[in-house]
């Protein structure tokens, strides 16, 4: 159990922080909420106290014998500010200590994650962007806001990312301080990353398909890690069971042939291409144009043809400097056997990095955690265990190290 301080600034998105708070407590963390005075105009103290199960700290002058602004910051394992308004970012960037939350930010030595939410004009204003750059230069993780509908009828970048999205990035920072530093440093700025995620569906008729149980969680986690490290990310999304992360361009696809077309369209100028999707290996040879009908007691025999291997195709057309990453789920007797199977697959597919899962003990599909080996042409590069977002950061790190060679 970690101790998380959840700072809430005064914006309408404060209501979403209630859901974020629930996610943190359900994950077993001890959450202390520090709302600003303006945040309390949106969501009251009672709500924060009931949801956190802790006393809510609202003033530097309450419980002064405990010196709350020093204690809260010092004892925190993670500080998350959601929503972070333009005013909060400005106060944090200039080191103000004019209320409890800004004071806590000055005393915290743990990772600090801020999730901005404001109107597009305020987000894009040079003053706000300069404040964000200042905070990042000091190691603060300022998440990229989502695009879409704002409070009024307008839309654009400035929306608070969904609570699950903020939680995933925040907990990755809690688990791995280096990941937090790379997010703050925006180490993928200027890079283009293309990720596929989910499972394809191959039509049998207009209403039925053959599919698989890939949720898309791992690919979504990779897209999230890359976008929060500053990359321009395209997510080729095949029937995702989870929401895509904030800030990525989403290209929806259904079948393996659509996925292949989308990947080949977006990959040529990418620095990193990741095939985290589970494309079907076979597709019905003659899908019916009309709904298949039962005929007496007869069963159904369907002929399948093999689909194209998207990963191998991308690797074959790889421009210089690009890193192509594949995934492999294998059943192996031990780690040496797993590495042997992976090495064969890496060579067969022609990719630079293979993320290897041992699925002998049960499937990883839909699970929040993952345990992988990272394999390059030269052999085992490393291993990663943890939430899929933490593992995603390790995969991006391994791909970056291959790029820099
Ligand atoms: N893949 C792909 N196109 C396909 C099938 C798989 O690009 N038609 C990609 C997956 O996205 C993954 C990698 O290939 O990155 C490994 O998938 P896997 O199913 O393990 O590979 P196969 O070649 O089908 O190997 P096997 O014969 O072991 O099933």
Image (spheres, helix red, strand yellow):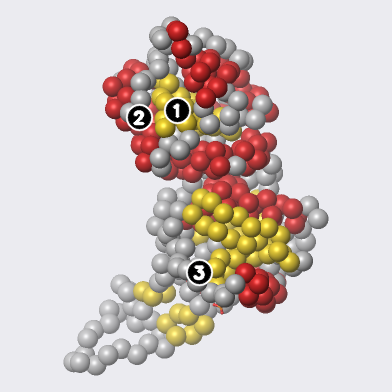
How many numbered discs?
Answer: 3
Picture residue at 50% right of the left edge, 69% below the top: 359
- Looking at marks 1 and 2 on the same chain, the residue that comes earlier in the sequence is marked by 1
Q: Earlier in the sequence, mark 3 or mark 2?
A: 2
**Would you call the spot at circle 1 few (<14 residues within 10 Å), some (14-19), or many (20 or more)?**
many
Q: Residue furthest left?
A: 296
Q: On the rendered structure, is 197 left or right of 21?
A: right
For disc 3, the neighbor class at 10 Å (few under 14, some 14 to 19, many from 20) is some
Judge whether 235 appears above or below 362 on screen. above
Determine whether, in the image, residue 163 is placed left or right of residue 398. Answer: left
Query: Pointer 1 and pointer 2: residues touching (CB < 8 Å)?
Result: yes
Name the foreground residue: 127 vs 200: 200
Instruction: Using the numbered discs, state the Cα–Cα distance from disc 3 to disc 1 in whole angstroms.
Output: 37 Å
For disc 3, the marked residue is: 359
Which residue sits at x=49%, y=44%? 168
Say which of 18 and 244 sits in front.
Answer: 18
Q: Residue furthest right?
A: 405
Q: Is residue 396 left or right of residue 242?
A: right
Q: In the rendered image, which residue does mark 1 sit on?
A: 6
Q: Residue 192, how many percent across, how many down?
A: 65, 50
Asked which secondary structure carries label 3, the reply is loop
The residue wearing badge 2 is 52
Question: Does the CB distance between marks 3 and 1 fall below 8 Å?
Answer: no
Looking at the picture, how far across and down is residue 55, in whole percent?
35, 21
């Amino acid at each position: 159990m970690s101790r998380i301080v959840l700072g809430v600034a005064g914006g309408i998105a404060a209501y979403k922080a209630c859901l974020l708070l629930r996610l943190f407590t359900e994950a077993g963390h001890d959450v202390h909420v520090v709302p600003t005075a303006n945040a309390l105009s949106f969501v009251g103290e009672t709500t924060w106290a009931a949801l956190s199960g802790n006393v809510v700290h609202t003033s530097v002058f309450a419980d002064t014998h405990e010196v709350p602004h020093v204690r809260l910051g010092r004892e925190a394992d993670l500080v998350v500010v959601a929503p972070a308004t333009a005013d909060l970012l400005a106060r944090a960037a200039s080191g103000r200590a004019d209320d409890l939350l800004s004071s806590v930010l000055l005393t915290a030595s743990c990772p600090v994650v801020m999730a901005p939410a404001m109107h597009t004009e305020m987000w894009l204003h040079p003053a706000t962007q300069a404040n964000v750059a200042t905070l990042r230069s000091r190691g603060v993780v300022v998440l990229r806001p989502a695009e879409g509908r704002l409070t009024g009828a307008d839309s654009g970048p400035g929306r608070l990312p969904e609570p699950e999205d903020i939680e995933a990035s925040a907990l990755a920072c809690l688990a791995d301080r280096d990941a937090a530093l790379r997010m703050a440093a925006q180490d993928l700025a200027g890079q283009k990353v293309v990720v596929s995620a989910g499972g394809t569906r191959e039509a049998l008729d207009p209403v039925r398909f053959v599919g698989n149980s890939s949720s898309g969680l791992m690919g979504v986690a990779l897209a999230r890690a890359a976008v929060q490290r500053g990359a321009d990310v395209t997510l080729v999304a095949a029937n995702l069971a989870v929401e895509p992360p904030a800030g990525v361009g989403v290209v929806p696809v259904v079948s393996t042939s659509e996925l292949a077309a989308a990947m080949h369209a977006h990959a040529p100028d990418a620095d990193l291409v990741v095939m985290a999707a589970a494309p079907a290996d076979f597709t019905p040879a003659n899908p019916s144009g009309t709904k298949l009908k039962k005929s007496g007691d007869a069963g159904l025999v369907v002929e399948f043809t093999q689909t194209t291997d998207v990963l191998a195709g991308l690797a074959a057309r790889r421009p210089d400097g690009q890193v192509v990453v594949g995934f492999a789920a294998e059943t192996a007797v031990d780690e040496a056997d797993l590495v042997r199977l992976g090495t064969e697959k890496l060579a067969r597919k022609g990719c630079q990095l293979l993320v290897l899962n041992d699925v002998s003990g049960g499937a990883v599909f839909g699970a929040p955690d993952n345990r992988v080996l990272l394999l390059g042409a030269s052999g085992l590069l490393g291993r990663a265990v943890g939430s899929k977002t933490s593992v995603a950061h390790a995969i991006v790190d391994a791909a970056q190290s291959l790029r820099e060679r």
